[in-house]
Image: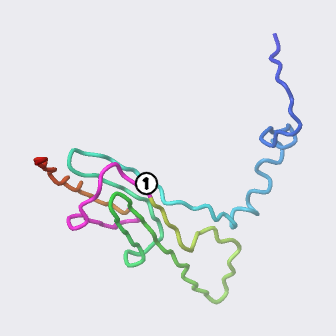
């Protein structure tokens, strides 16, 4: 038995058989214009802290910045292309990204900024973010 589907001519997400033929045809031309580069992160929560691993390939340690404000973490980095032209060589294609990237995210608990640590090695930023100990609330006696 054949499966029937309803065709909606106004749905832009429907791929036609002709789209599948040309799906990868123009990809090499458009690859250099990809500006949707993101910092990929992994966040692990432990009892007293958060551990964050962020992939930031191509950045130098001095160009990576981390800001913590309460429970919000902001990571930014800049990668620069080194232009080295050798005599007799011709660059045919360069697909390496250069520019600025940033990523912000919030956590469930405020971070103790004074004891937070950041280490950048081999393109991976590792953050150790201890949770801020909640201040003990005190019940006041009503007179």
Between residue 31 and residue 133, name the one nearer to us: 133
In what element is the residue under mark 1? strand
Residue 106 appears at what percent x and percent y?
40, 54
Between residue 126 and residue 141, name the one nearer to us: 141
Residue 35 appears at what percent x and percent y?
64, 65
- The residue segment tinted magenta is 105-124
Q: Residue at x 17, y 54 (%)?
A: 135
The vertical placement of 10 against 108, above or below, is: above
The vertical placement of 118 against 107, above or below, is: below
Q: Which residue is mark 1?
A: 41
Q: Residue at x 38, y 59 (%)?
A: 72
Left or right for 66, reference 1: left
Between residue 75 and residue 119, name the one nearer to us: 75
| Quadrant of the image occupied by residue 90 | bottom right
Callout 1: 10 Å neighbours few (<14), some, many (20+)? some
Q: Is residue 128 magenta?
A: no
Q: Residue at x 34, y 66 (%)?
A: 121
Residue 39 appears at what percent x and percent y?
49, 60
- Image quarter hosting the N terminus: top right
Left or right for 42, reference 20: left
Residue 98 appears at what percent x and percent y?
57, 73
Left or right for 54, reference 129: right
Report how many numbered discs are placed on residues in the image: 1
Left or right for 137, reference 127: left
């Amino acid at each position: 038995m054949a499966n029937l589907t309803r065709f909606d001519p106004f749905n832009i997400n429907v791929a036609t058989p002709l789209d599948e033929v040309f799906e990868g045809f123009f990809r090499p031309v458009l690859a250099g214009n990809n500006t949707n580069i993101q910092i990929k992160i992994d966040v692990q929560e432990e009892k007293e802290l958060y551990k964050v691993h962020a992939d930031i390939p191509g950045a130098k340690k001095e160009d990576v910045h981390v800001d913590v404000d309460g429970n919000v973490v902001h990571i930014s980095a800049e990668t620069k292309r080194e232009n080295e032209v050798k005599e007799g060589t011709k660059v045919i294609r360069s697909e390496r990204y250069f520019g600025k990237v940033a990523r912000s995210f919030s956590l469930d608990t405020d971070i103790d900024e004074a004891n937070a640590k950041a280490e950048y090695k081999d393109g991976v930023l590792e953050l150790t973010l201890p949770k801020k100990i909640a201040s003990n609330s005190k019940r006041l006696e009503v007179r």
